Amino acid sequence: MVATVPHLESVTASSRGRVVTDRSGAEGYVGRVCFKTGPPRRLGIELEWTVHHTEDPSRPLDPAALAAALGDHAPRTLRPDSPHLALPRGGTVTVEPGGQVEISTPPESSLSRLHAGTASDIDYVADRLAGAGLRLGDHGCDPHRPARRVLHTPRYAAMERAFDRIGPHGRSWMSGSAGLQVCLDAGTTDRVAARWTALHRLGPVLVALFANSPRQAGRDTGWASSRVRTWFDTDPSRTHPPPPGDGEAGSWAGRILDTPVLFVREGEDMHDPPAPVTFAGWIAGAPGAPDRPPTYDDLDYHLSTLFTPVRARGYLEVRYLDAQPSGDWFTPVAVLAALFAREETVDEASERALPAADRWVAAARDGLADPVIGAVAPRVVELARKSLADTDLTAAQAGAVDDRLQEAAQ
């Protein structure tokens, strides 16, 4: 969600450059910046797509053609002299390591307006790409080409090095996959834990309902969501969901500090740590820690290197959904908006999803064919369909989502 969070900005601005001296101070800081509390009002989305040459989708993407198509909307990672203008309806374009295009919306209090504005920006980008002989992909993984990084930034090079030490999946996830992210307000102080837990419990059901990546790099993988499989295998310490029963918001700070440092930023350069060390180990000066103490600026950057199914960034960022076929992107967005429109619905959705809450791998592999998820999904869909009435969608918008949900749950 492209938006500054005033609380987060003020806290981090006052702390940057200050040395982190102890774990408890770091945990308190993480709690303050990652969970901005208040009445939930806003919603934002981040939509990713692989990009293909229209006449031959298996042809390697030409980044120069992509930069020309995006013009002054291109990010500076792709075109260094770009003014990086917003799209006509306020969305911002970024480009992922393999040339995947992402549109991030400004936060919106109206689901109906979010739909209309985002649809308009998508059409605008698609038209610009079409003029350059390019098109947006329809799946959560590139079904045609092996992953290939086309952005050469210090951050992406350092990520690739780190993931290569674990296995081959990091490159595929970074440069050959596309997701749909939904960003929700964390909620009031007394409701943060319930909303956080519900998003985790719903994960396997929603992964299965919207799995859309059975092919990867020209082959059938045998998985409903090859994207989730590849993502989870990239670096389990920073991509896996929490263990069952450990999805409480209060455990987030502990996970941040107990996750290994991916790389150390020094100006524009990214350096590998001398040896594997967690952020807590860096604070304590453990063997393998960098030769300087960490600052809160380092901790801010470390936060950006966790890629969990739900990530706290002042708001709650849901990262487990595959990119959807053309025209279907709005359905999972509306589902989450409807299920989180009322706090009693959040609790009911959490309870209905509970029997399948630990079935992440089964959801990615088998989708709705998993018997447990197959039994739970219709009850979650039923609640979502009923709760569309709690949003401000027009009758036509709600009807289209309802039709799609009936198809998805069958």
Image (cartoon, rainbow, N blue to C red):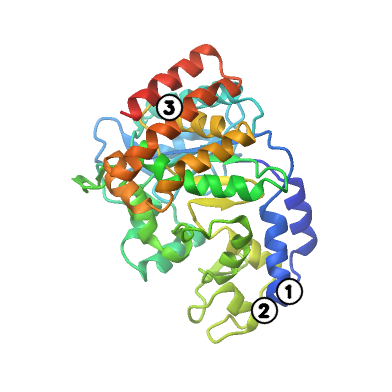
> Callout 2: 10 Å neighbours few (<14), some, many (20+)?
some
Identify whether 223 is placed above or below 163: above
Residue ID for mark 1:
19
The quadrant of the image that shows the N terminus is: top right
Q: Tell me if residue 210 can be seen.
A: no
Question: Taking 266 as reference, is 310 left or right?
Answer: left
Residue at image mark 2: 293
Where does residue 272 sit, x and y in percent of width and height?
50, 74
Q: Describe the element under mark 2 as helix, strand or loop.
A: loop
The residue nearer to you, when weighing 47 against 345, is: 345
Q: Residue at (61%, 83%) from the top-left corner?
A: 291
> What is the distance, in whole Å, between disc 3 and disc 2 at their CAs?
47 Å
Looking at marks 1 and 3 on the same chain, the residue that comes earlier in the sequence is marked by 1
Label 1 with label 3: CB-CB less than 8 Å = no
| Nearest-to-viewer mark from 3 and 2 | 2
Badge 3 density bin: few <14, some 14–19, many ≥20, Cα 10 Å: some
Q: Amino acid at mark 3?
A: Ala
Q: CA distance from mark 1 to mark 2?
A: 7 Å
SS at circle 3: helix
Q: Are marks 1 and 2 in contact (CB under 8 Å)?
A: yes
Outermost residue toward the left in this view: 219
Q: Residue 86 in the image: x percent, y percent?
A: 60, 33
